[in-house]
Image (cartoon, grey):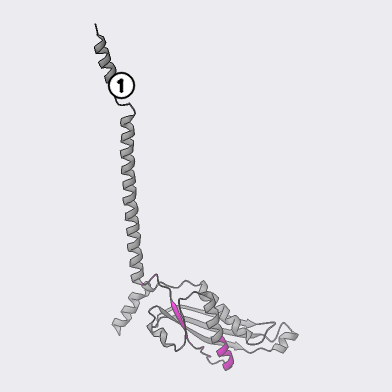
Amino acid sequence: MKTNRDSSLVATKTTFRPPAFYRPNKQRGVLAALLLLLGALQLQLFVSTALAKSSTVEKAGGAQPWSVQVDRVDPGDVGLDPSFGAAIYENLLEELAKTKQFKQLFRSGDRNANDVPSLLILKTTVQKYTPGSETRRAVTTVNGATKLNVRIQLATREGHVVLENVVDGNVRFIGGNLRATHNLAHNVALTLKRSTLPEQAELIPEQETGKMSK
């Protein structure tokens, strides 16, 4: 038969026994801490990898935008009026600046372009020229149009052509003859803007090969 003293000891032991949910909660806490630690390590690894890739791209030059030097317009053999050639050139500089496609924009003969590593040279050659008449345009919509047709070429210093295209610029109705030069320059800038230029890193092997062959 149990005494009162035995009963009190049993009661005491029962009172200080840890709750049933204590162990599972402790295990969950340890597991959560491990998961947080693993997540932090994975994030650190991802950031380090991303920075390494970014550094590699920058060293290769692929992340740097191109700059462009605009050469004087070649009038070809179409009898282009000198004022038209000058107007085409000035309008090209203005329209290219508006697109903000290139990091820097240089005029022909600008010595500052010599120190730019990522430089393309824009060459413009007039292929066709039809002098129009403002008077005829005012009278009829059939005759009197001023028409310009040029071949544009983007090339590196080493002569590697990265883009070549034919662009038109006309004045068919209202506007002075020189308006054709503005329309032409606008179309050239739009053509370049819509074109996908190669990464500089893609041209490095070919440039080095060209130097070795020389």
Q: Secondary structure at mark 1?
A: helix
Would residue 79 be seen by someone viewing this image from the given angle? no
- The kind of residue on which mark 1 rests is Thr
Is 17 displayed left or right of 135 in the figure? left
Residue 21 in picture, x, y percent from top left:
34, 28
Q: Residue furthest top?
A: 1
Is 179 displayed left or right of 36 in the figure? right
Residue 141 in picture, x, y percent from top left:
72, 82
Is 66 displayed left or right of 48 in the figure? right
Q: Which residue is mark 1?
A: 15
Viewer-closest of 106 and 16: 16
Viewer-closest of 213 and 119: 119
Residue drawn at point x = 33 percent, y = 75 percent: 205
Would residue 136 be seen by someone viewing this image from the given angle? yes
Residue drawn at point x = 30 percent, y = 31 percent: 23
The residue carrying pointer 1 sits among few (fewer than 14), some (14 to 19) or many (20 or more) residues within 10 Å by Cα, namely few
Range covered by the magenta-colored residues: 61-88
Residue 131 in picture, x, y percent from top left:
63, 90
The quarter of the picture where the C terminus appears is: bottom left
Residue drawn at point x = 41 percent, y = 85 percent: 112
Viewer-closest of 203 and 130: 203
Is 121 displayed left or right of 135 in the figure? left
Query: In the figure, residue 134 lies in which quadrant?
Result: bottom right
Query: In the figure, residue 175 lies in which quadrant?
Result: bottom right
Q: Residue furthest right?
A: 139
